[in-house]
Amino acid sequence: MSGLRGRLADGAYALGWSTVRKLPEPVAVRLGRTIADIAWKRRGKGVRRLEANYARVVPDASPQRLAELSRAGMRSYLRYWMESFRLPSWSEERVRTGFDPQDVHHLTEGLASGRGVVLALPHLGNWDLAGAWVTTELRTPFTTVAERLNPESLYDRFVAYREGLGMEVLPHSGGSAFGTLARRLRDGGLVCLVADRDLSASGIEVTFFGETARMPAGPALLAQQTGALLLPVTLWYDESAVMRGRVHPPVPVPESGDRAEKTSVMTQALADAFAEGIAAHPEDWHMLQRLWLSDLDPAGAPPGASPAPDALTPGEGPAVSAPRSGPDPSGEPSGTAPAATPRDDSARVPRDEAREGATSDTAEGAS
């Protein structure tokens, strides 16, 4: 990110957290919808990419249906931002009543067992709100990871925001994040990772809505190496002011196979759980970037999913695989929403450390 662009992005987020958080909730809701509708009508990079991704999720959708989905998707995306800018000012009661998850017993029973829990989420709904609910309603702190941003002030702003919600935020740099996550889990703690996109060479190939995509190895590797429970989580909005969610049953560690084979099976199970939640509520999947491998090669893109440039996805901090040696293959130009956010690199694991992770906390094996 250029210096000027970085300063503009930092200023935009500062304005959001200082101004939007003070608005009455109905005003913030209307503002978010207005911005979403304007962006949707412009049909910029983010809207076109979102629509192309929805074409995979709903393959029989007509052009009119895809347009309706992308409009609803942009409204959901801006609802995420309006909520996120306002979350620091929400009372504990507002946080508790703002999220209504199903099957939370999978989480509470896992924590009570003392074995540690990894929650893995896709870019559905508002993962920051879900995290705030966990720290507020369940009184359970957790650890997550965010990639460093430029300018540093923007990264610091996001870290301060999430720490203010009760999260421990680790920087995804220097190869130490995985080891710290493993220690938290061995101590019976909770780790939350956004884990539906990884374009690095160490990403695990999965079948996702009938095509090949890559997802991070981190959640599966952490579960294998620490004995922690691995739980997929999906989120969605309805017409109320309350976000809904579901904690899915645990993903088991296969009894046979080497570590790579087990990781592949477990990551595919995560992808299947994510697909279930996304198919039920596609408009709440905020994937404004390329995901499927065929989209990285436009010549291989399927009918109905015409190539479109990427936009940035929102607030991706909770997700661990290998740091890239070069730029993200997606290019990540700015789109219709804020110019930069912590990306979901946290569910990745450095390759060298992945090979040695079974013997050392500081070695990584698993954004």
Image (tube, grey):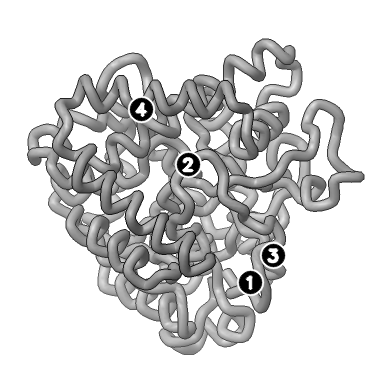
The label nearer to you, 3 versus 4, is 4
Q: Which amino acid does the dot numbered 1 rest on?
A: Arg
On the rendered structure, is 22 left or right of 5? left
Asked which secondary structure carries label 3, the reply is helix
Q: What separation in Å lies between label 4 and label 1 (alpha carbons)? A: 45 Å
Q: Are marks 2 and 3 in contact (CB under 8 Å)?
A: no
Q: Which mark is residue 261?
A: 3
Q: Is residue 108 something one can see in this rendering?
A: no
The amino acid sitting under disc 4 is Gly
Quickly name the residue at label 4. Answer: 32
Q: Which mark is residue 259?
A: 1
Q: CA distance from mark 2 to mark 3?
A: 38 Å
For disc 1, the neighbor class at 10 Å (few under 14, some 14 to 19, many from 20) is some
First of labels 2, 4 by sequence position: 4
SS class of the residue under badge 2?
loop
Question: Relative to residue 55, is residue 185 drawn left or right?
Answer: left
Q: Amino acid at mark 2?
A: Ala
Q: Which mark is residue 337?
A: 2
Q: Amino acid at mark 3?
A: Glu
Q: CA distance from mark 1 to mark 3?
A: 5 Å
Asked which secondary structure carries label 4, the reply is: helix
Q: Residue at x 27, y 47 (%)?
A: 15
Instruction: Report whether 90 appears left or right of 143.
Output: left
User: Of the residues tagged 2 and 3, which is closer to the observer?
Assistant: 2
